[in-house]
Amino acid sequence: MAHASTPGSSRCSPTVEVLMSPSLAKFWSPFCQICDPSYHSIFPGECRKYPFQSHFLDTLPCNSLDLRALDIAHRLEMVRIMIQRLKCNVFMLSYRGYGESDGYPSQHGIIKDAQAALDHLSQRTDIDTSRIVVFGRSLGGAVGAVLTKNNPDKVSALILENTFTSILDMAGVLLPFLKWFIGGSGSKSLKLLNFVVRSPWNTIDAIGEVKQPVLFLSGLQDEMVPPFHMKMLYAKAATRNSQCTFVEFPNGMHMDTWMSGGDVYWRTVMQFLVKHAPEERKHNTGKIISHV
């Protein structure tokens, strides 16, 4: 994360930027009074942005299981507090096929969207590109893990919150009778239906290859992703990466850990950023948090 600033100018206030398909823009504008309706194209034919200023790559998809047109708007309160507490700029991405974004969702396509957003940030001159931090919750954590693994030179750190080990394992959680036929991240045996899932999102494999610092934020009351998934992810990452931190929040549910965690939550994130994305890296520029 970092403060965004224009070269040669004084430091600007933290801001937020959103990438989305043209069809989603009409849903977003009523919910964000600070946006400029004259948004312009970043990725011609695919995505557009509101020209806020951005400095935090946030790979958080709006909701891993129930994505609707207004899901990005549902994140505004968290983003508002994030800006206030962390003094960072926030970059949010709406993937193809999510909410009202154009196209069809797939693991390959979503990874391409996240990579395109990161490449865009990395080419900007108004931010400190050495301080890009990826933040992902739920499915966003799966995307964030892959993006961070694939870009050791562009992403300085990763924050995962309430993320699953794999979609294969989640199938057995949502439909218990399937656990005999699908999943198995905790064992060496292969199960019959694993081969028919087109988007397996094996976060546990990706996290094991991440070399950057990782902060794991786990809500112990998570009603969607069993908390032991986060413990498995941490265990896998920590075997090869000594820069991993695991923090539990006793009252945290899937989507409200940031609220139930209160000051402890935000202090934890801030301490992680100060240590692994320090402001001293480049004077007069700021950190970016990217939601994937």
Image (tube, helix red, strand yellow):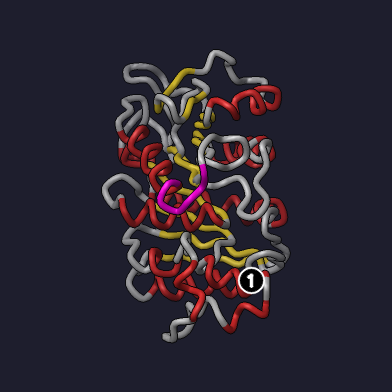
Magenta span: 104-109
Q: In percent of the image, x 43 and y 46: which residue is there? A: 109
Q: In percent of the image, x 71 and y 65: which residue is there? A: 223
Q: Quadrant of residue 122?
A: top left
Which residue corresponds to mark 1?
A: 226
Seen as rendered, the residue at the extreme top is: 38
Instruction: Report helix, strand or loop for mark 1.
Output: loop
- Asked if the stretch drawn in magenta spans residue 39, the answer is no
Q: Classify residue 286 as left or right of residue 94.
A: left
Instruction: Answer above or below: position of 173 versus 71.
Output: below
Q: Quadrant of residue 202?
A: bottom left
Residue 77 visible in this rendered orientation of the protein: no
Seen as rendered, the residue at the extreme left is: 153
Instruction: Answer above or below: position of 76 versus 110.
Output: above
Residues packed near mark 1 inside 10 Å, few (<14), some (14 to 19) or many (20 plus)? many
Instruction: Answer above or below: position of 187 versus 165.
Output: below
* Nearer-the-camera pick, 211 or 92: 92
Quadrant where the N terminus sits is top left
Measured as percent of width and height from the top left, residue 160 is found at: 51, 58
Q: In percent of the image, x 40 and y 28: which residue is there? A: 43
* Amino acid found under the numbered disc labelled 1: Pro
Measured as percent of width and height from the top left, residue 287 is found at: 42, 38
Residue 33 visible in this rendered orientation of the protein: yes
Q: In percent of the image, x 60 and y 80: which residue is there? A: 179
Measured as percent of width and height from the top left, residue 100 is found at: 61, 35
